[in-house]
Image (cartoon, grey):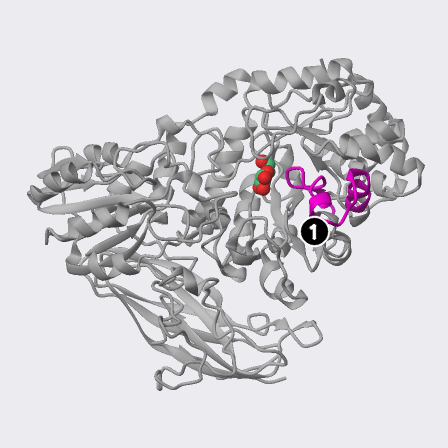
């Protein structure tokens, strides 16, 4: 049934009104503004509050189960959005329920956590970020949107853009790592992948609303313990945690989601500074804000609300628009309005922004426009989508160590390769935790990928699981050792259970879980070449492995085509090019650990490492085991001959800095050339390095290319002592490098006004 009544009325009003609406809309389109106003005028306050209400349809549980008679509200037109319902039939059923029985027949907005794929599952976001290919990340987000929209989903709760510097926190797997600037580039790519390049693209049938989450600083949870207290300075917010959200906002993200944590003593979901002062007044955000799951209810245990009525009041007065599955707004806002504890204008602002998105998606024209069973069937897991997943998987793999060139394991070299470990034949873990509606049984296991890629080769594959992912059970060690003893090369395939990273999955020990490392130690004793392929969702403590294992490949959770992607790289059919976007520590004791740290007043000086009374540990170097930006290749690259056209930067000028990048190895390959700067002395302390540019270049063996970057005042801009975003005069260093610890090509320049 179409929403004829509402539409005709809107059209009538739209024609009648010619001037711009009286409110600043997301689209800035006066026709849309008047359509929204015409609907708003028809609504009762309870119906308006209904639009601010979202429920989980219980198809999936992504938080504490909150039973409520939400279908009753749905039939009364008192539900603005439903999430966790999928398939055309499932969405149609609920849309019918809302439209056939409600007074105004306002279409419901259907949402889902489409984090890194919907049916076709791509590498987890942290893995994909290691590709350093924003266009690829945009493409996978676009495919995810296409599949989700084909099942009636119009809104995804992604991208997660939280900067994360503590591998104990399980949700590092959802983001783009530790760097605010790089995280901003990824945020833009993913927002545009989901939504298209402008709000006008939202009308297309293969785009969905995106959601920048979790605003803000969720990744700074103390102790890396999920949901824990966050206490960062306002400066840290602006320098580290805001940037990817700001980038998402400027890229046109339609929605934001609140973080569970408090910020500066106030939980994000009640934090007026964040959602009104910064997001709306400073950044001019015009979309709408949804809470995280029951986050309004949680203001009570946070200790900032005595009860849910007070929680609802504080959330609305902070600038929050929609209550995710908390059942709090619908039960408290009507009375709070009557008691004048919240403003009607706040309710109207929230409802306008929600209604506008429904208009922009075309749902008022036709609430069933996304619901086409034929399109659904023809869209899901198309072969071309699977090929993109396989490519994204290959490009997400980071080669961390390759002693004696154990990798690649050449198909045309006669050898027996023992595949040992709990993740060799595993399918269930490959999609990671936020696996959309991916069918875990459909993922290609590493064993299937190797069998396919090495068929008709001279490589004989043998296998034993050896142990499981989590327990102390060693009963499989004997068989594993026997299989390994009869092989030329041992390839251990180990990692984490997918539930051991993601939400509510923090760890105090980030080594390989269970007895996997113990099994690896036994395998190494055989004295044969041992390679390790890791499938996990966070940087691990690989200090023992780095010392004793010949080759280490970080393969993360690569999704539906994981087995093929890993086999493509291990076999050498694809030369790895991934580079880390999160530092790997030597031990959990170093966390939080990140490359763009401050120098302190007592830094460890490389030229005098033994000096006492410096900022060091007694039992470990300060440096990471593997740094930000690090990744090996099957070939080797050299960067040399760095040049600068000038060493003085002027306010209206630029410095061109370049270097020659050469492939001096035996294979074609890709390398991520990175530009770092350092502000030697500012009005506030500055990081010892900051990424400010990168180029991923392909070079045939023996070839070289000059890579050039431009440095302008924008490149060195920062928040000065007065929190003004400016370029400060002074001395700077610049590097062109292949990771954050590569200082081979260093230059200096001065910025003068
Ligand atoms: C979860 C997550 C959030 C997700 C939401 C809906 O608790 O924190 O990222 O989008 O609930 O599933």
- Report the side of 110 relative to 568 (left or right): right
- Report the side of 524 relative to 706 (left or right): left
Q: Is residue 608 above or below residue 125?
A: below
Observer-nearest residue: 258 or 98?
258
Identify the element where label 1 is drawn. Answer: strand
Observer-nearest residue: 613 or 371?
613
Q: Residue 501 location, x and y as percent?
A: 44, 44
Residue drawn at x 48%, y 28% as measured from the top left = 437
Residue drawn at x 43%, y 57% as measured from the top left = 581
Residue 19, visible in the rendered structure: no
Quadrant of picture, ligand 1: top right
Q: Is residue 636 above or below residue 290?
A: below
- The image quadrant where one finds the C terminus is bottom right
Residue drawn at x 36%, y 27% as measured from the top left = 442
Residue 709, visible in the rendered structure: yes
Q: Residue 295 location, x and y as percent?
A: 68, 41
- Report the side of 173 relative to 247 (left or right): left
Residue beneath disc 1: 267
Which residues are drawn in magenta? 286-315
Q: Is residue 105 above or below residue 225?
A: above
Q: Residue 108 location, x and y as percent?
A: 70, 25
Observer-nearest residue: 13 or 616?
616
């Amino acid at each position: 049934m179409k929403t004829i009544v509402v539409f005709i009325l809107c059209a009538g009003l739209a024609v009648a009104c010619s001037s711009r609406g009286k409110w600043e809309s997301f689209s800035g389109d006066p026709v849309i503004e008047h359509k929204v106003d015409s609907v708003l005028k028809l609504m009762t306050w309870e119906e308006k509050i209904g639009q601010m209400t979202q429920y989980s349809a219980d198809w999936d549980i992504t938080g504490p189960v909150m039973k409520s008679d939400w279908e009753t509200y749905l039939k009364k037109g008192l539900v603005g959005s439903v999430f966790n319902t999928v398939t055309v039939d499932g969405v149609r059923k609920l849309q019918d329920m809302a439209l056939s029985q409600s007074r105004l027949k306002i279409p419901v907005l259907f949402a889902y956590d489409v984090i890194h794929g919907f049916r076709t599952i791509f590498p987890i976001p942290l893995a994909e970020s290691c590709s350093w290919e924003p266009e690829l990340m945009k493409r996978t987000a676009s495919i995810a949107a296409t599949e989700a929209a084909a099942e009636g989903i119009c809104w995804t709760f992604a991208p997660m853009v939280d900067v994360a510097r503590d591998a104990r926190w399980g949700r590092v797997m959802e983001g783009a790592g530790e760097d605010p600037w790089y995280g901003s580039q990824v945020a833009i790519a993913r927002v545009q992948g989901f939504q298209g390049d402008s709000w006008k693209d939202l009308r297309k049938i293969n785009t969905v609303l995106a959601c920048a989450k979790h605003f803000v600083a969720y990744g700074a949870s103390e102790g890396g313990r999920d949901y824990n207290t966050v206490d960062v300075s306002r400066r840290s917010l602006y320098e580290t945690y805001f940037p990817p959200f700001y980038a998402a906002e400027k890229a046109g993200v339609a929605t934001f989601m609140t973080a569970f944590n408090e910020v500066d003593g106030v939980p994000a979901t009640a934090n007026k500074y964040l959602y009104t002062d910064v997001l709306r007044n400073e950044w001019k955000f015009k979309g709408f804000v949804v809470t995280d799951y029951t986050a309004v209810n949680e203001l009570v245990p946070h200790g900032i609300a005595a009860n849910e009525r007070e929680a609802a009041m504080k959330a609305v007065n902070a600038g929050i628009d929609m209550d995710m599955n908390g059942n709090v707004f619908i039960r408290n806002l009507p009375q709070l309005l009557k008691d004048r504890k919240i403003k009607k204008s706040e309710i109207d602002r929230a409802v306008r922004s929600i209604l506008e998105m429904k208009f922009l998606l075309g749902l008022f024209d036709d609430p069933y426009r996304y619901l086409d069973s034929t399109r659904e069937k023809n869209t899901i897991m198309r072969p071309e989508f699977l090929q993109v997943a396989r490519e994204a998987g290959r490009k997400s793999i980071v080669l961390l160590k390759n002693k004696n060139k154990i990798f690649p394991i050449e198909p045309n070299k006669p050898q027996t390769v023992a595949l040992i470990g709990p993740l060799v034949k595993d399918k269930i873990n490959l999609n990671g935790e936020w696996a959309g509606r991916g069918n875990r049984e459909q993922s290609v296991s590493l064993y299937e990928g190797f069998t396919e890629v090495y068929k008709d080769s001279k490589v004989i594959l043998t296998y034993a699981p050896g142990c499981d992912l989590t327990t102390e059970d060693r009963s499989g060690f004997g068989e594993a050792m026997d299989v390994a003893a009869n092989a030329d090369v041992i390839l251990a395939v180990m990692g984490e259970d997918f539930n051991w990273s993601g939400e509510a999955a923090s760890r105090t020990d980030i080594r390989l879980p269970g007895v996997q490392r113990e099994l690896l130690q036994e395998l190494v004793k055989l004295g044969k070449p041992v390679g390790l392929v890791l499938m996990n969702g966070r940087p691990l403590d690989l200090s023992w492995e780095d010392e004793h294992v010949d080759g280490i490949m970080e393969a993360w959770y690569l999704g539906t085509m994981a087995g093929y992607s890993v086999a493509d790289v291990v076999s050498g059919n694809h030369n790895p090019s991934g580079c880390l976007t999160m530092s790997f520590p030597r031990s959990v004791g170093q966390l939080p650990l990140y490359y763009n740290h401050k120098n302190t007043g007592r830094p460890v000086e490389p030229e005098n490492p033994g000096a006492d009374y410096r900022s060091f540990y007694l039992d470990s170097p300060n440096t990471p085991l593997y740094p930000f930006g690090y990744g090996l290749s099957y070939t080797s690259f050299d960067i040399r001959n760095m040049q600068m056209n000038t060493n003085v930067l002027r306010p209206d000028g630029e410095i061109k800095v370049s270097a020659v990048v050469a492939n001096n190895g035996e294979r074609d390959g890709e390398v991520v050339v990175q530009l770092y700067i350092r502000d030697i002395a500012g009005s506030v302390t500055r990081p010892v390095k900051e990424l400010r540019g990168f180029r991923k270049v392909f070079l045939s063996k023996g070839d070289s290319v000059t890579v050039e970057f431009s440095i302008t005042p924008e490149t060195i801009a920062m928040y000065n002592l007065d929190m003004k975003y400016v370029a400060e005069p002074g001395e700077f260093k610049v590097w062109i490098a292949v990771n954050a610890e590569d200082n081979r090509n260093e230059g200096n320049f001065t910025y003068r006004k």
